[in-house]
Image: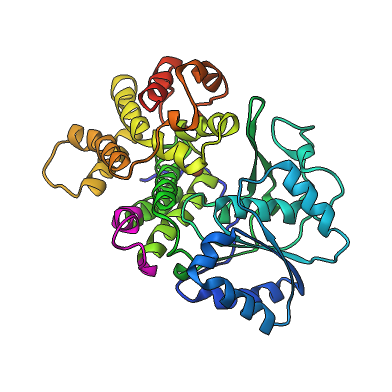
Amino acid sequence: MLPIPAFSFARVPPIHFGTGKIAQLPTLIQQQGGRCVLIVMGQRSLQASGQLELIQTLLRDAELHTHWIACQEEPTTQFIDATCKQYRGQSVDAVVAIGGGSVVDAGKALSAMLPHDNSIFDHLEGVGKGLPHSGIKLPFIAVPTTSGTGGEVTKNAVISEVGEAGYKKSLRHDNLVPDAVIIDGNLLVTCPRSVTAACGLDAFTQLVEPFLSPTATPLTDAIAWSGLKAFQANFLAACSEGAQDPQVREGMAYASLMSGIALANAGLGIVHGLASPLGGYFPIPHGVACGTLVAVAMTTNWQALKARSPNSPAIAKLVRLGQLLSGAPGHNDDWYGEACGELLHQWTDQLAIPRLSSYGITAGHLDKILDGTRNRNNPVALSREEIQAMLESRL
Ligand SMILES: [Fe+2]
């Protein structure tokens, strides 16, 4: 008997995956009843890929009326409120986001707030008035051009305010899952190496944390494992000789996509618990925060599990992961468990993932960061001292 635990599974949008799929964008907009569309994009990478002109032609040929907005940074309440103010009353009837994780978050937040008069701040978890969002929103299509956050399949938009009283908080509602997703390798090939590396490690973290989560189910395990296999096969190539290969890029985009579905249904662990205060207080991109910490988190979790939770199913999962990542046959369980962290450390060095101190973070800041950190769905509860040691090792 294999008992299946009780679970709920979040809605997944229709996904259009593959090289050339961007050609479906006009039809998808029209299917959502859209004629007048707000296109939010991160312009640099798209212009570099030569895809911007193609997208403009596709939309023009379909006689869609478009407003274009550039969004380069992680979205703030001010950006969302000001853009909503500008476009309310212009009968926008759909939003499309073409860009990295921040752009997808911005598009998701705009689609959620355009039909309402109030500030998005009212609905942010843990900082504003905490008012629930009604779920009434404009149709939203996500077209990611980086492979990392998985935000194209999740129901929250992360809004940031960086600084002394900074935060990184979510606007969240089941209805905010995008109405359609297009993932096209041609839009991914010009993503720079540093972004590919950091986002790739974020996607890995978003696969491994749900995989090891106490709330994992056979369904989320299957999804996370499928993403981990795609990550293992494509990550180093995407950061080097395979960067221009749409199929390699699509391998990483698949890993990211699976990570979004896995995290939405099994939660995240200590790396993401730390990424929120780090990203709120310091100008560190989310991918870098996760990428710089994931190796030491793997090692810390393995050691804590072995010492305090030897019967945890996460131990066998880490052994299986060590087998996948190393590809080396014939070792014992301890070797594979330790190999996970060791390989990640190697990649972190090889890809020159920045340290925390590159963003002005010093030992004097650690208490404040630790006060804002949660263990979340980590496979084992870590002490404040263990988490502090993780941060210290990456200063
Ligand atoms: Fe993440």
With 222 as the anchor, is 339 left or right in this view?
left
Whether the magenta-drawn stretch holds residue 98 is answered as no
Q: Position of residue 145 (x, y in %)?
A: 51, 61
Give the side of residue 204 with respect to residue 96, left or right.
left
| Region of the chain picked out in magenta, as a range | 231-247
Q: Quadrant of the C terminus?
A: top left
Quarter of the image with the N terminus is top left
Q: 202 or 206, which is in the foreground?
A: 202
The residue closer to the viewer here, 64 or 350, is 350
Residue displayed at 57% across by 23% down: 372
Instruction: Give the residue at x 52% y 52%.
Output: 150
Residue 233 belongs to the span the image colors magenta: yes
Q: Position of residue 82 (x, y in %)?
A: 79, 49
Q: Position of residue 293 (x, y in %)?
A: 40, 33
In this image, 71 relative to 224: left or right? right
Horizontal and vertical percent for residue 32?
72, 71
Residue in front for this viewpoint, 353 or 153: 353
Q: Is residue 338 above or below residue 285?
A: above
Q: Residue at x 45, y 73 (%)?
A: 19
Q: From this viewpoint, which residue is outermost toward the left?
A: 330
Question: Does the image show residue 314?
Answer: yes
Q: Does 66 sit above or below residue 356?
A: below
Whether residue 115 can be seen here: no
Furthest residue in direction bottom, as rendered: 61
